[in-house]
Image (cartoon, grey):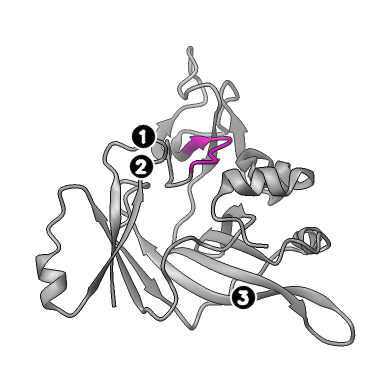
Amino acid sequence: MNPQDDTESWNIFPDHRVWHNKLWLSMKLGHRCGPAGIQVPESGEYVVRPIYNLMGMGLGAKIMFLRPDFKHCQIPPGHFWCERFEGPHYSADFEWSHLQDGLWGWTQINCWRGYNNPQLWRFTKWEKIRDVTIETPWFFSKLGWNWNMRHINVETIGDKIIEVHLRRSPDPHDGHEILIPIWQGDDISSYMRDGYKYIEAYDDADGQLPIPRLGFCVK
């Protein structure tokens, strides 16, 4: 069973809803993090995101300079701060499969590098990567014990996991090496001249993105 988005995952896998809680996951992974109202340990740039975001698309994620001596809360309620990691943004799909000696585990079936600077939600390119292997912590195996859950998607910055989705990526990966997200107002003529094909894949995070994504130019 492969849900198409996180709202479907929420309904299909009710016993695993805590995995949608990005603050819980960050704490479980040992990241320095905290909810709105909790001071950061030192001044610096942090990633601020909603604790829950079932609509995807990086909605509400941003980089903020935070101080430990604030007089008023610096981030919105329902959001959390997390230490900022350095490195490429990766997104990998995993399949629950038989490994050896009767053991089962998550097997990586693809990996994509995303480019999204400076706006965290607005990716400009996804490129298939074959020389990166993402290690999943031991407690991820609990997800595989639900035999209806065949796939997960894991996002990282470098080797630091930042998100887990109880589904495969919905992007049109199959048979392609490069995906160029096309946002409202983008001109795709140069991509079409270079041999790309356009695939419609509209998403505006339920009307909450500043501009909608219309689809992808793929190659």
Whether residue 211 appears in this view of the structure is: yes
Which image quadrant for residue 206? top left
> What residue did someone put label 1 on?
207
CB atoms at circles 2 and 3 under 8 Å apart? Answer: no
> What residue did someone put label 3 on?
108
Residue 49 covered by magenta stretch: yes
Element at label 3: strand
How far apart in space, not on screen, are marks 1 and 3 (Cα)?
A: 33 Å
Disc with the residue nearer the chain's start (2 vs 3): 3
How far apart in space, not on screen, are marks 1 and 2 (Cα)?
A: 5 Å
User: Mark 1 against mark 3, which lies toward the viewer?
Assistant: 1
* Whole-percent x, y for residue 137 in the image: 73, 63
User: Mark 2 against mark 3, which lies toward the viewer?
Assistant: 2
Q: Is residue 32 left or right of residue 122?
A: right
Residue 148 covered by magenta stretch: no
* Whole-percent x, y for residue 189 in the image: 10, 66
| Stretch of the chain drawn in magenta | 48-55
> What residue did someone put label 2 on?
204
Disc with the residue nearer the chain's start (1 vs 3): 3
Q: Is residue 113 left or right of residue 152?
A: left
**Three-letter amino acid code at disc 1?**
Gly
Name which residue lies at 78% across and 64% down. Answer: 144
